Amino acid sequence: MKRTSLFTLAASALLTSSCFAADLTIYTYDSFNSEWGPGPQLEKSFEAQCQCDIEFIAVDDGVSILNRARIEKASTKADVLLGLDDSLTQVTRDEGLVQAHGVDLSSLTSALAWDDEDFVPFDYGYFSFIYDSSKIAQPADSLKALISSNASVIYQDPRTSTPGQGLMLWVNAVYGDEAASAWAELAKHTVTVTKGWWEAYSMFLEGGADYVLSYNTSPAYHAVVDGESKYKAALFDEGHIAQVEVAAISQYSDNPELAKQFLSFLISPEAQHIIPTTNWMLPVIDNVELPAPFSSLITPKRLNFTPAQVAEQRKAMISTWRSSAQ
C-alpha cells in the first residue's frame, strides 16, 4: 500500500543511485522506500543476513516500475522488480522482463491460492473508497450507487497507478459493456485524477473530496498511527478488486541467486512482521500478529480477474477510460 509517503510528503526519502554499485539493486515505488515505509527496515534486516549491500531505486508507482523496466531492458540496473501487482504479471512476463524465482511458496496463506513461478507476493489488500464518517453518515453501499451519486471523488490514473488500474478493472467487472457510460457518469463528480496514490490521498485528507480510491486497510493506519477512527472504507455489494503486490527477479539481473534470497526473505516471518504496519497492507503468511484495528477492517467479496485477461484487454480498457472519463 503506497501510503506512508502521503503522511510524510517531503520526507519521502528516496534512495537514488549511489557512487558504488550495490550487490543487489531493487526497483520499487516511492512510498515503499520512504522513511516510514518498509524499505529501510527490510534493507537493514536483509543486509544483516546476507552480509551484502542492497540499494532501492524508487519511482512513482508499480506501473512506473514496469514502464522503466520496459524502456531499459538489458541496460537496467534492476536485479529485483518490487511493487508490481497481480494485474501486471502477465504483461511483465510477456515482455520477457523477469525470470523464474525458484522460491518455496508453501508458507503462503491459502487465501491467496498463489502459484506463480515468476512472481512472489509480499502483501495484499482490497481497493476501496475511503470516506470521513464524521461527514458522511450513510456511505455508498455499491460501486453503482457511488457512480450514480453526486458525491465528489478522487481517484488515480490507470496508466500510471496500480490503484487507478484497479478501479478500471473494478468498473469493467461491474459494468461490462456499459463501462464507457459509467466512466462518463463518474466524470461528472470527479474532482481530479492524480498520477499516483499519495497525491490523491493527500488531497482527500485536506478535504478535497467525499471519497478517495485507496485500500480497505487504510483505516488501520489512521487508527494505529493517528488514533483516529473516523476514516472508513465503504463496503460495496458487488464485491471489490483485490491487489496482490509482487516482486520478481529481473531477466537481466547480474546476481539472480542473491535476488532469490531476497524474495525468500520477503515472505519470511521477519519481513512479514514489518510490512503490514509500514506498507499498511495484509501479510501473505498466516499467524502474523497485527494491531487490533486490523480485525475491524471490511472483508469484501473478491471480484476475480486473471492476469491474462488484463494483458489482453488492458489497452482497450484504457482507451475506453480515456474517451469517456476525460
Image (tube, rainbow, N blue to C red):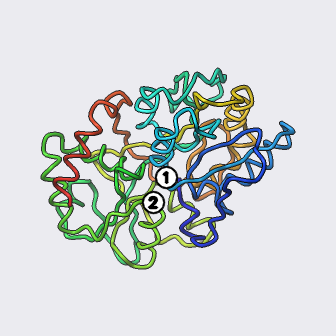
Q: Nearer the viewer, residue 99 or 294?
A: 99
> Amino acid type of disc 1?
Asp
Q: Residue at x 22, y 69 (%)?
A: 189
**Is 263 above or below relative to 198?**
above
For label 1, the crowd category at 10 Å Cα-Cα, with few meaning under 14, some 14 to 19 and many 20 or more, is many
Q: Residue at x 37, y 41 (%)?
A: 301
Image-quadrant location for residue 177: top left
User: For the residues carrying marks 1 and 2, which lies nearer the camera in this image?
Assistant: 1
Residue at the disc numbered 1: 61
Q: Nearer the viewer, residue 283 or 189?
A: 189
Image side of residue 22 versus residue 313, left or right: right
Q: Where residue 197 is drawn, which disc sits there?
A: 2
> Which x, y percent locates residue 180?
15, 49
**Is 242 above or below relative to 29?**
above
**Is 149 above or below relative to 267?**
below
> Amino acid type of disc 2?
Trp
> Which x, y percent locates residue 311?
34, 32
Q: Report the quarter where the C terminus lies.
A: bottom left
